[in-house]
Amino acid sequence: MGHLVFLMLAALCSVSWTQYVPPYTEDCRTGMYPPNGPTFKGPVSWYTVDLDLPPHKRWTAVIIDKKADLVNMIQAIKDFANAFVPSGRLITLVDFTLPLVVETLPFPFKEEISGIAAASGVRLGEVALFNLFYEVFTVCTSVIAEDSKGNLLHARNLDFGLFMGWDVKNKSWIITEKLKPLVVNLDFKRNNQTVFKSTNFAGYVGMLTGIKPHLFTLTMNERFNLDGGYIGILEWLIGKRDQMWMSFLTRSVLENATSYDEAKHELAQTKLLAPAYFILGGNQTGQGCIITRSRELCINILEIDLKLGRWYVLETNYDHWDDPFFLDDRRTPAMKCMNETTQANISLKTIYDVLSTKPVLNKLTTYTTLMQVSEGKLESYIRDCPNPCMPW
């Protein structure tokens, strides 16, 4: 037993040390934009979601186009689950239990998830499981910066799939790779007018990344906490439903809020199923913040403050007043590259360079999104991190 513990500690120390050693880390990248080379896996296609349609029909066009990719991803999840419970009982439990959870979800999410299941032919419980993922575990990097002209720039790497099946041959996370073909850009319209835009996974009805053109931008990062998503989901199952699912809240804010201040208030005050970081950018100087949330309270709001020399705010998955977990320090290299870039040279182009630098870019990175609120711009790119590359 002592020998086993020693080997585990040695492995952890090795991974911890590796993230600071080339080629797993590197000098800040330059010249990566427009996206090119081995870290660029492809552009992201655009689809329209018509909010005037009945909820169960809104996603049909997207799902018809992405059906095969959704089926492949769901099968990978089932294979992963069956590896832990070979009897298949875990998936049977999902197929039996989660449709009951769907029935408890607020409008229009219940109807949209049911519509996706019908259009894809995937069991309702399995589509529901896909939509619950983000309440449980993911890792990301988000940044908002104000350039010297007062323009607000917002960008993120969406990292997902940690500990969800490692492909030894290809040195990649199985679920991460299955998610990449599902990345889509969405233009949500009402009365044929854009309400908001988002980068998302086809089949996922919550929002992780989005822009309300000319008003605000929003991304959400997981906040690791013992009082986390598992607890919130259990409370929901036993009937305590006065909280809101994180990604449902971000979608509601993108759809309904009419200003930065209104969005900020909703994100800070609404009870949540899981703790989170909301990274919110506005359309005026100084309007950029990280809202650190527990499930019930707003813990802290860190804002851009030019008088203090704080021209950007950056969030990974750890409270900004604490050191990041020693095995997962993406914050330090990201801030190093932001500081080397300087406010005078910051742009969507140079932020893309920051998010292309290892280990900010890693084996979990599915896509990079760049947003500029004043232009109503959202552009996204599917990413890859060629070997050698940190697993997270």
Image: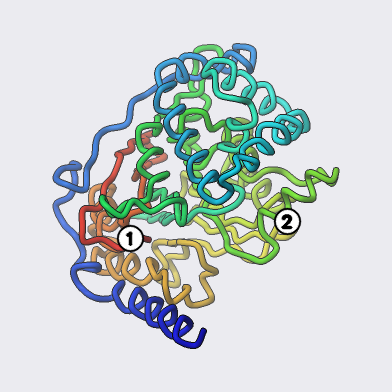
Nearer to me, 43 or 384: 384
Furthest residue toward front:
87
In the picture, which quadrant includes the C terminus? bottom left
Mark 1 sits on what residue? 360
Q: Is residue 242 left or right of residue 150?
A: right
What residue appears at the point 71 percent right and 50 percent down from the top-left corner?
272
Q: Is residue 340 left or right of residue 274?
A: left
Visible in this render: residue 3? yes
Nearer to me, 266 or 295: 295
Where residue 265 is drawn, which disc sits there?
none
Q: Nearer the viewer, mark 2 or mark 1?
A: 2
Image location (x, y in percent) of residue 330: 37, 66
Nearer to me, 106 or 103: 103
Helix, strand or loop at disc 2? helix
| Number of residues whose C-alpha sits closer than 10 Å to that of mark 2, classed few (under 14), some (14–19) or many (20 or more) | some
Q: CA distance from mark 2 to mark 1?
A: 29 Å
| Number of residues whose C-alpha sits closer than 10 Å to that of mark 1, classed few (under 14), some (14–19) or many (20 or more) | many
Quadrant in the rendering for residue 137: bottom right
User: Label 2 is placed on what type of residue?
Assistant: Ile
Q: Is residue 322 left or right of residue 378?
A: right
Image location (x, y in percent) of residue 362: 32, 57
Mark 2 sits on what residue? 231
Which colour assignment does the render follow? Answer: rainbow
User: Label 1 is placed on what type of residue?
Assistant: Val
Helix, strand or loop at disc 1? loop
Furthest residue toward right:
239
Nearer to me, 305 or 184: 184
Residue 327's place in the image compared with 355, above or below, is below
What residue appears at the point 81 percent right and 43 percent down from the top-left corner?
241
